[in-house]
Every structure is written in structure tokens, then in C-alpha cells.
Image (cartoon, grey):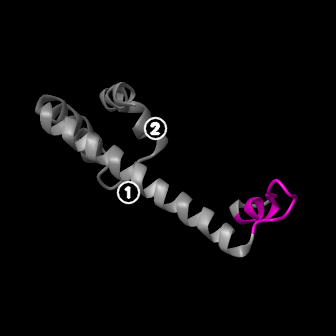
Amino acid sequence: MNDLMDGLRQIRDEEGKQLADEEVLDNIISLVIAGYESTSIATMWSLYYLCKYPNVLRQLRAENMEIKERKKGDGDFLTMDDISEMKYTRKVMYLYW
């Protein structure tokens, strides 16, 4: 099995038949929509709690802005080292999840 499509093509029903092309597509669409929906809900709750607790938002922003300022001329993207330094951000994420 190389990817999702291969995996879905190998699934067999109770009678030993492979999924039809339409069933494979239905499963892929369901996975995409489920991924979209769960991401949307997680984002919505994150925003809700950040609005409810503005002191947490201020601390998160301060921590992230500090890293941004330090990275000037170093590139725009976060590295694993940057993320490992985000101690407050990690605490907030662990509390939420």
C-alpha cells in the first residue's frame, strides 16, 4: 500500500468484493470534509477562548513577537528550534487539547 487511494482500493466488503470507484471517491470526500470540519471547529474554539481570556492572547502574542523580532534577516519561517522555545504557547496548546 503506497497511499490512501491504494488502501481504499484494497478494502473488501463482507462478500469479498472491492469497493467500487464511486465508493472510493465517497470515502476520500468524507475524509477531506471531516478534516476540514474538525479543523474549523478547533479554530473556532481556539478563537473563542483567546477572546474570552485576553491576558492569554497578550502573552502568546508577546512570545511570538519576540521570536519574530529575533528572526529578522534569518528568514520568515519558524524552525523546530523556534517552536521548542515557545514555552507558554506549548502550555496553552496542551491545556486546550
| 7 drawn magenta | yes
Judging from the image, what secondary structure is the residue with disc 2 in? helix
- What secondary structure is the magenta-colored segment mainly? loop
Give x and y (percent) for residue 52.
Answer: 13, 34
In the image, what residue occupies the spot 68% across and 67% down? 24
In the image, what residue occupies the spot 85% across and 64% down? 17
| 61 drawn magenta | no
In the image, what residue occupies the spot 34% across and 30% down? 96
Bounds of the magenta span?
5-19
Q: Residue furthest bottom?
A: 21
Give x and y (percent) for residue 22.
Answer: 66, 74
- Residue type, numbered disc 1: Gly
Q: Residue furthest front?
A: 15
Judging from the image, what secondary structure is the residue with disc 1 in? loop
Numbered label attached to residue 65: none
Q: Residue furthest right?
A: 16
Image quarter (top left, top right, bottom left or bottom right) of the C terminus: top left
Say which label, 2 or 1, has the lower sequence index.
Answer: 1
Of residues 13 and 47, the one drawn nearer to the viewer in this rendering: 13
Distance, label 2 to label 1, CA atoms, is 14 Å
Image quarter (top left, top right, bottom left or bottom right) of the N terminus: bottom right
Residue 36, quarter of the rendered image: bottom left
On screen, residue 42 above or below 19: above
Of residues 40 and 27, the one drawn nearer to the viewer in this rendering: 27
On screen, residue 91 above or below 65: above
Give x and y (percent) for residue 88.
Answer: 30, 27
Of residues 70 and 21, the one drawn nearer to the viewer in this rendering: 21
Q: Which residue is mark 2?
A: 81
Residue 53, quarter of the rendered image: top left
Answer left or right for 54 relative to 35.
left
Give x and y (percent) for residue 68.
Answer: 27, 47
Q: Which residue is mark 1?
A: 75
